[in-house]
């Protein structure tokens, strides 16, 4: 007996061993069959990500606020200080444009090793600029 699609989506959403990607793909199929265009477009954004979108186009729940840190070879991880509040606000925000499958893979990678962490790094050019401003040189692991 075939399980109806809506029940499959519910099972996938409730099963801690199931991936969000699987549930979203099934939900996308249901949207297509039912003509639910708006919800289908929302699901597509989750599956395809927000890469190339401006920060204003990304939902608030995909904007993480944190405390930027740099690694000092002498003192370990230290919070960065900024000259202006604007710099701090900009560099304390990580907009998560990744696809749900990529996020799931990153979390699996992080949790598969002891002390694993789910971190976002600055682009290399910005990282180099930050390192130079710290006078620690521009070589990793700044």
Image: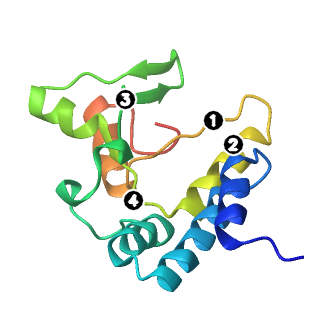
Q: Considering the numbered disc 2 on the image, is that residue within a helix, a strand or a loop?
A: helix
Separation (CA) of disc 4 from disc 3: 16 Å
Q: Name the residue: 30% across, 30% down.
A: 134
Separation (CA) of disc 2 from disc 3: 18 Å
| Label 1: how many Cα within 10 Å (few below 14, some 14–19, many 20+) | few
Residue carrying label 1: 117
Give coordinates of residue 35: x percent, y percent: 41, 83
Separation (CA) of disc 3 from disc 1: 14 Å
Q: Which of 46 and 50 is in front in this view?
A: 46
Residue 26 placement: quadrant = bottom right
Question: Do callouts 2 and 1 mark residues in contact (Cβ within 8 Å)?
Answer: yes
Question: Do callouts 1 and 4 mark residues in contact (Cβ within 8 Å)?
Answer: no
Residue 93, compared with residue 100, is above or below; it is above
Residue 21, compared with residue 86, is above or below; it is below
Which label is found at residue 110? 2
| Label 3: how many Cα within 10 Å (few below 14, some 14–19, many 20+) | few
Q: Nearer the viewer, mark 1 or mark 4?
A: 4
Q: Can residue 83 be seen in this view?
A: yes
In the visual, does 137 lie left or right of 52?
Answer: right
Q: Considering the numbered disc 3 on the image, is that residue within a helix, a strand or a loop?
A: loop
Q: Is residue 84 visible?
A: no
Separation (CA) of disc 1 from disc 4: 18 Å
| Label 4: how many Cα within 10 Å (few below 14, some 14–19, many 20+) | many
Residue carrying label 4: 97
For marks 3 and 1, the one nearer the N-term is 3
Give coordinates of residue 29: x percent, y percent: 57, 79
Residue 58 placement: quadrant = bottom left
In the visual, does 55 lie left or right of 32?
Answer: left
Q: How many labels does the image show?
A: 4
Residue carrying label 3: 66
Residue 7 placement: quadrant = bottom right
Q: Nearer the viewer, mark 4 or mark 3?
A: 4
């Amino acid at each position: 007996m075939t399980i109806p699609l809506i029940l499959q989506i519910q099972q996938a959403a409730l099963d801690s061993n199931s991936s969000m990607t699987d549930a979203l793909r099934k939900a996308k199929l249901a949207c297509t069959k039912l003509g639910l265009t708006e919800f289908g477009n929302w699901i597509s954004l989750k599956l395809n990500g927000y890469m190339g979108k401006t920060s204003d186009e990304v939902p608030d729940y995909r904007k993480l606020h944190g405390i930027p840190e740099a690694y000092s070879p002498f003192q370990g991880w230290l919070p960065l200080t900024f000259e202006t509040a604007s710099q701090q606000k900009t560099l304390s925000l990580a907009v998560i444009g990744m696809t749900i499958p990529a996020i799931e893979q990153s979390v699996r990678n992080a949790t598969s090793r002891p002390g694993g962490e789910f971190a976002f790094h600055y682009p290399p050019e910005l990282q180099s600029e930050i390192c130079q401003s710290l006078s620690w040189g521009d070589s990793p692991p700044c």
